[in-house]
Amino acid sequence: MRTIRLLVKYSIQVQNMKKFLFLILLVIGTGSAVVAQAPATHKNKRYFDINKNIDIFNSVIRELDMFYVDSLKVDSLMQGTIVNMLSRLDPYTEYYSEENMGDLR
């Protein structure tokens, strides 16, 4: 009888220890996930902002193409936009269109 009580007591202690270890691993895992997410969240926000601005730009081009008084030369407009954007960075960053890439070879 005493042996059965000891086994039951030991079994309960093992179950409690397993629960305790599970909780510790859960806390460690959650903490690790939070720490790992911090840089990813910053990156995700950056990519979200970039994609949001690209969507706005696409909407403007689409609206201009549909409703502007004259017909647009979209390729020329896009090339000018890219060159203007890069010129704001520094004098050394340049864009070469597909046609101009042949001149570099």
Image (tube, helix red, strand yellow):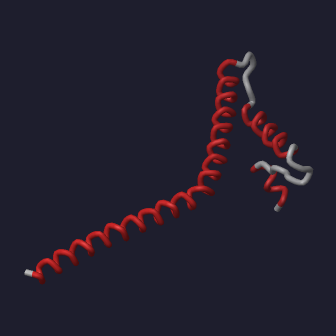
> Residue reaching furthest left?
1
Q: Nearer the viewer, residue 5 or 104?
A: 5
Residue 26 is situated, as x and y percent measured from the top left of the image, at 41, 63
> Residue reaching furthest bottom?
3
> Residue reaching furthest front?
2
Q: Nearer the viewer, residue 18 or 73?
A: 18
The answer to whether 60 is drawn above or below residue 44 in the figure is above
> Residue reaching furthest top?
69
> 45 left or right of 88?
left
Badge count: 0
Residue 36 picture quarter: bottom right
Residue 54 picture quarter: top right
* The N terminus sits in image quarter: bottom left
Q: Residue at x 26, y 74 (%)?
A: 13
Q: Residue at x 81, y 37 (%)?
A: 80
Q: Residue at x 66, y 32 (%)?
A: 56
Q: Nearer the viewer, residue 14 or 85?
A: 14
Q: Residue at x 32, y 67 (%)?
A: 19
Residue 66 is situated, as x and y percent measured from the top left of the image, at 65, 21
The answer to whether 23 is drawn above or below residue 67 in the figure is below
Residue 55 is situated, as x and y percent measured from the top left of the image, at 63, 35
Residue 69 is situated, as x and y percent measured from the top left of the image, at 74, 16
> 31 left or right of 84?
left
> 105 left or right of 52?
right
* The C terminus sits in image quarter: bottom right
Residue 57 picture quarter: top right
> 102 left or right of 90?
left
